[in-house]
Amino acid sequence: MADYDLVVAGGTVVTPADMFRADVGVRDGRIAAVGIGLKGERTVDADGLLVMPGGVDSHCHIEQLQRGGGADEETWTTGSTSALAGGTTSVITFSTQFKGGGILGPLAEYRRRAEQAMVDYTFHQIITDATDEVVFNEIPQVVASGVRSLKVFLTYDPLHLDDRQFIRVLAAARRNGAFVTVHCENYEAINWRTAALLADGRTEPKYHAWSRPPVVEREATHRAIALAEMVDQPIQVFHVSHPEVAEEIARAKARGLKVWGETCPQYFVISADDMDRPGFEGAKFMCSPAPRDAAASEGLWKCIRDGVLDIVSSDHSGWSYETPAGKRVHGTDAPFRDIPNGVPGLAARLPILFSEGVSKGRIDPCQFVRLTASNPARLFGLYPRKGTIAPGTDADLVLWDPTRKQTISNRLMQHIIDYTPYEGLEVTGWPVATIRRGAVVMRDGVVQAEPGSGQFLARAPYDMIKPTGNLPFGFDASAFQV
Ligand code: URP
Ligand code: ZN
Ligand code: ZN
């Protein structure tokens, strides 16, 4: 009788720390052994392939509830299919709050929808209205249910929080042992520049970038970090688009603050010029913060190598190009202000990062694993169950052909969205199989998994996000109901 249910044989195992030739033995959905000459009931040949932890995408929008009813076009089944096609086995998505309402109702509805998932999943809880009821009564319940991270927006109507509300969310997180992620852009500055651009007749998609230059993101990042320092609450800055923004994170880390930074593939391969394509085409590339230029992209790689940016997520936020409810919901002549923000990228995340990073010699495979799996798992309380390859961990693996050349097309992305901003991009390195808790759920691009086979990942308290204990004058204002 074989020792293992499944053996992934003869590949090069890549962990966050090292790379070595080994077999991986799987029993009951977990890794049972990493060694040589393992025998399983089934064998997957990984000769010539890298065997890496399944991707953990800690920032993606899937079937997120919308204000007027309904939800994002990307469903849990299509989003899961896309994730698995691209080598990602766990996701963190968003349960939202609508101003004037609470968070428990939307979370219950969102959990119901997520029961269709085919990847493992957990959520960030968005707070758009930091009422007494929410911060003192509902956030404790949400955190106790295993949703241990909150998300706030410092811009966007009608989502943004002012400083007082943001501080109240930071304090609620501190009281309840939760983490806070932040969309950092200055709301008033963007609105002011937008009004001026529209008054001047500059309405096309390319002016999206003009409305929110890097300084707007840098200011909000500085402010978010300063307020988090005052409350002594660890935070992650989402989707950093420019090295001058990352500088704020570098300074915070140097001062010993618990501040982490994320960036996304779009900031490596899309630029502001893409939003200047003819007609309405530029809308396909619109996201916030806005894509910048080639120099900024190269600068982000240095921030990654220097350890300033820790995670590369997709920020998958799909709006189809041709459908009436997508990018053109307000018509193709709509001013940039009214075009939905966001680009799809669940399946493209790993191939773009591998190709631009590892294949082009900017990072090594272990760093790739850290950025795409281990660091998100650590930061969001999923490690070591997720994000590494070692006995006892979930058998979530991606088998990767590092030499395979592929041209990205929308068909390969397998999402519901009718386009990819990466159409035609040549990449080197491609996922050939995805294994989720020991089940082969993708092979040569064919995804086979049952809706509902994904598991909710409840997150218990963990050390990484504990406050430092350094409070101004030693006074903990978050202990008071203010
Ligand atoms: O433009 C973007 N990034 N849309 C998704 C929502 C967000 O801001 O993360
Ligand atoms: Zn955001
Ligand atoms: Zn997002």
Image (cartoon, rainbow, N blue to C red):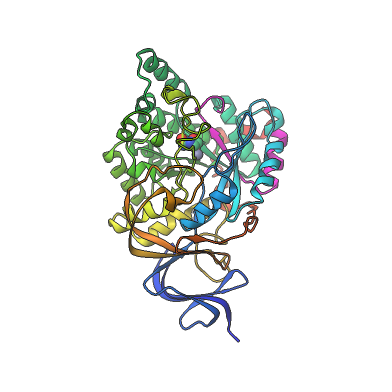
What is the residue that sits farthest to the bottom in this orientation?
1
Q: Position of residue 253 (x, y in %)?
A: 42, 44
Q: Is residue 310 visible?
A: no
Residue 75: name its quadrant: top right
- Residue 369 in percent (x, y) is at 43, 59
Q: Residue furthest top?
A: 199
Residue 315 in view in this figure: yes
Instruction: State the extent of the magenta-drawn residues as a range.
Output: 136-159
Q: Nearer the viewer, residue 431 or 262?
A: 431
Q: Position of residue 310 (x, y in %)?
A: 43, 49
Residue at 62% x, 32% y is 477
Determine whether, in the image, residue 282 is placed left or right of residue 25.
left
Give yes or no for residue 175 being in the magenta stretch: no
Q: Is residue 353 left or right of residue 102?
A: left
Q: Give the left or right position of residue 293, taking residue 104 as reference.
A: left
Q: Position of residue 35 (x, y in %)?
A: 47, 78
139 inside magenta stretch: yes
**Quarter of the picture holding the C terminus:** top right
Could you tell me which quadrant the N terminus lies in?
bottom right
Count of labels in the image: 0
Q: Residue at x 43, y 53 (%)?
A: 412
Above/below status of 243 relative to 391: above
Q: Residue at x 33, y 39 (%)?
A: 243
Asked if 132 appears above or below 395 in the picture, the reply is above
